[in-house]
Image: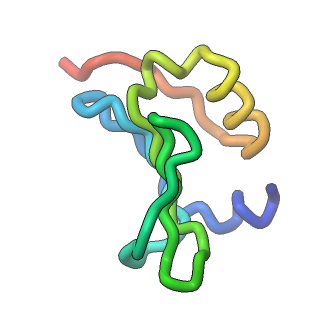
């Protein structure tokens, strides 16, 4: 996990679209896989992970899936979930 943490370029959350995003590389992705209906992992042409996108994040934020993601990746953030005013 340390290698992934060192490669994170940006972590963001868009409250309008309810999408959480971890950007690992700043180049265009070639394809993606969806290990679950609301998670998309994007890859470059060499099958390197470019980013991770989680849709409907606010409904998943307190779920075990997101808790494990935060724990497994040791993410250094505490998001406020909700729509921007």
Residue 42 position, x and y percent, is 48, 62
- Asked if 77 appears above or below 79 in the picture, the reply is below
Residue 41 position, x and y percent, is 52, 55
Give the left or right position of residue 25, taking residue 29 as reference: right
Query: Residue at 69% across / 20% down in the picture?
Result: 64
The residue positioned farthest toward the left in the image shown: 85
- Asked if 77 appears above or below 42 in the picture, the reply is above
Query: Residue at 54% across / 38% down in the picture?
Result: 36
Residue 50 position, x and y percent, is 51, 67
Display colour scheme: rainbow
Which quadrant is the N terminus positioned in?
bottom right
Give the left or right position of residue 78, taking residue 82 as reference: right
Query: Residue at 66% across / 27% down in the picture?
Result: 65
- Asked if 59 appears above or below 12 in the picture, the reply is above
Tally of numbered discs: 0
Residue 38 seen from this side? yes
Residue 28 position, x and y percent, is 36, 76
Query: Residue at 27% across / 19% down in the picture?
Result: 83
Image quadrant of residue 85? top left
For this rendering, which residue is in front, 10 or 24? 24
For this rendering, which residue is in front, 72 or 84? 72
Residue 11 seen from this side? no
Image quadrant of residue 20? top left
Give the left or right position of residue 71, taking residue 7 as reference: right
- Asked if 11 appears above or below 30 in the picture, the reply is above
């Amino acid at each position: 996990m340390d290698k992934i943490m060192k490669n994170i370029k940006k972590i963001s959350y868009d409250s309008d679209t309810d999408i959480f995003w971890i950007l690992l590389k700043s180049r265009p992705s070639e394809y993606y896989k969806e290990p679950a209906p609301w998670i998309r992992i994007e890859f470059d042409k060499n099958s390197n992970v470019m980013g991770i996108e989680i849709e409907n994040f606010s409904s998943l934020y307190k779920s075990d899936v997101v808790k494990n993601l935060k724990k497994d990746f040791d993410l250094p953030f505490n998001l406020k979930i909700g729509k921007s005013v």
